[in-house]
Image (cartoon, rainbow, N blue to C red):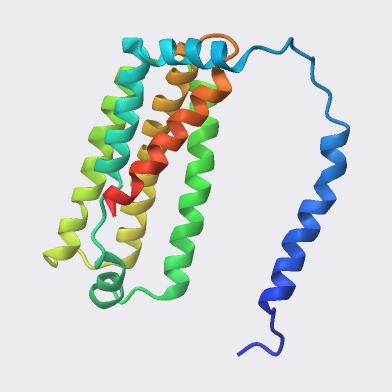
Amino acid sequence: ALPWDLSIPAFALIIAAVNLASIPLYVILKEDRTPPEAVGKFLKSFWQQIQRRATWQILLYSMVSHITFGVENAAKTSANYVLLDLHTSQYQIMVLFEKVIFFVGLTSIRKYALNLSWRKMIIAGSILITFFNTLYFLIIYDVVRLPWFYIFTDVSSKFMYTLNFLASLFCMVEVAEPGYEAITYSLITTASNAVSPLAS
């Protein structure tokens, strides 16, 4: 055990202090003013945009892909401790690698893949996610029982998930009408998050 402890109120105070320290940054933020638009007119135009084929198909893909790629066996984490003798430190390293790979995926796609076909990226990402997820059968059937093999397959799958995630978001913003990019992004994020419990 550690000689020091961090209570929940102390943790909450640290988070509050960080938020309070960021308030001056909002004050100095400069944005060009745009003329106000009637809410009814804005929502009517947005509804017309959603009804376009390019928009609702991307929205539907985002929802379906979050359901299908988000499915995970609830016993997988516990089974890893039994089958692989996975230690908590190894699991935490894997989670850290996943976050780093997600960042590397975002950066590399932004830098090198913006001009690639979104369809090809989605197909490639979907196939590779499926491939890396099926490698877990090697662990189940006792072909390979190495914790680092599991970490490699899970982290690689996270990179492919990033590919699919970005492909659905970037093209949605491209098909959005000028002035509706933020609400379109909010809609697709909300739709994706709303279906996440269906994958659990």
**Residue in the image at 82% along x and 36% along y:** 26
In this rendering, is residue 61 above or below 47?
A: below
Residue 27 visible, this angle: yes
Please provide percent x and percent y for residue 58: 34, 22
In the image, residue 14 lies at what x, y percent?
76, 65
Is residue 113 something that shows in the picture?
no
Relative to 166, residue 119 above or below: above
- Tell me: residue 175, above or below residue 90: above
At 23% across and 74% down in the image, what residue appears?
83
Q: Is residue 130 left or right of residue 158?
A: left
Q: Nearer the viewer, residue 7 or 40?
A: 40
Left or right placement of residue 147 versus residue 104 in this view: left
Residue located 14% across and 67% down the image: 142
Quarter of the figure with the C terminus: bottom left
Q: Nearer the viewer, residue 177 or 143?
A: 177
* Residue 171 image point, x, y percent: 43, 18
Asked which quadrant contains residue 87, the reply is bottom left
